[in-house]
Image (cartoon, rainbow, N blue to C red):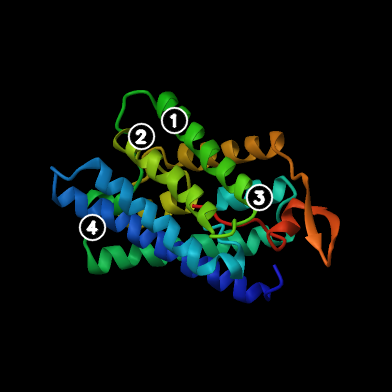
Amino acid sequence: MNRPLSHRCAAELAGTALLVGIGTGAVVLSARSPGAFPALLALAWFVAVFLPIVLVVRVSGAHLNPAVTLALAASGRAARRDVPPYVASQVAGAFVGSAAVATFIGRAAHLGATVPRIPSLVLAMGAEAAFTALLVASVFALSDLGEGPRRWRLTLPAAAVAVSTWAIGPWTGSSLNPARSVAPAVLSGTYTDLWAYVLTVALSGLAVALVWRARPTERLRNGTRARIDASDAVSDGGRAGN
C-alpha cells in the first residue's frame, strides 16, 4: 500500500473495531432473544465483515484479522515488516469494539466470546480450521484477482464468515479471527479454550499460505502487458479479511 503505515494501522484499528462491534453486538442481542433465527446472525456477520472492508480496503487492504495478515505475509502477498503493527492495531481495534458492545448493548453471552458448545474440542477446532481456511482462501482469491469491475469480489470474505456463522456458530462461536476471540474473552473473563482458538485459526491460515503462494499476474499497463506480483495487483498488501 502507498499510504503511510500510521494511516494503514489506524484503518485496521477502526475497521476491526467496527467488525467486532457489529458482529459480537449481534451475538449479545441474539442471546436476549432465544428464538432469533441463525440466518439473521449470519447476515449480521456478513455486514460486520463487508462494511469495514468497503470502508478501509483502499487504505490498509482491510485485513481486519491477525490470521489473515500472517497468511498474506507468509504467502508473499503482504510485507512481513507490517505484520507486528497490523496485528497490534487489529487487537486494539477488537478491544475497542468489544468495549463498545459492553457499554452500549450489554454483557450477555460473555460479550460474544467464542466457547465450544460440543463435547469434543478436537471436533470444534477442526471446524474452526476448515472455515478459517475457507476465509483465507477467499482473501487470497480476492488478492490475486483484484476487486473486479463492480467490486463484487469484496463480498467473498464476508460470505465465508456468514456461512461459517450459520454452519458452526452454534457449536464453536465461529471465531476465524484471533482478535475477535481474544477481546471479548478478556473483557468478560471467559478464557475457556481460548488458546485453542488462537492457535488453530493462525495455523489454518498459515497452512493455506503454504499451498497457495502468490502467483504472477498480468495487467495491461500503458498499452502493453506487464507481469507483476499478485500482491502488487492489489496495491502491495492483499485486500480484505475478517
Q: Distance of mark 2 from mark 4, alpha carbons?
A: 22 Å
| Image side of residue 139 versus residue 191, left or right | right
Who is closer to the viewer here, 211 or 117?
Answer: 211
Asked whether the residues under the numbered discs 1 and 3 touch, taking CB atoms below 8 Å apart as contact, a structural biologist would say: no
Who is closer to the viewer here, 227 or 176?
Answer: 227
Residue at the spot 66% in from the left edge and 58% down from the top edge: 83
Residue 92 seen by the camera: no
Circle 2 or circle 3, nearest the eye: 3
Give the mark, 2 or 4, whose residue is nearer the N terminus: 4
The dot on residue 127 is 1
Q: Distance of mark 4 from mark 3, alpha carbons?
A: 40 Å
Q: Which residue is mark 2?
A: 168
Badge 1 amino acid = Ala
Q: Distance of mark 2 from mark 1, alpha carbons?
A: 7 Å
Residue at the spot 57% in from the left edge and 36% down from the top edge: 204
| Image side of residue 118 versus residue 14, left or right | left
Disc 3 crowd rating (10 Å Cα; few below 14, some 14-19, many 20+) is some
Who is closer to the viewer here, 229 or 30?
Answer: 229
| SS class, disc 4 | loop
Circle 4 or circle 1, nearest the eye: 1
Q: Which residue is mark 3?
A: 145
Q: Which residue is mark 4?
A: 107
Q: Is residue 209 above or below residue 185?
A: above
Provide residue 100's location: percent of width, then percent of height.
32, 68
Asked whether the residues under the numbered discs 4 and 3 touch, taking CB atoms below 8 Å apart as contact, a structural biologist would say: no
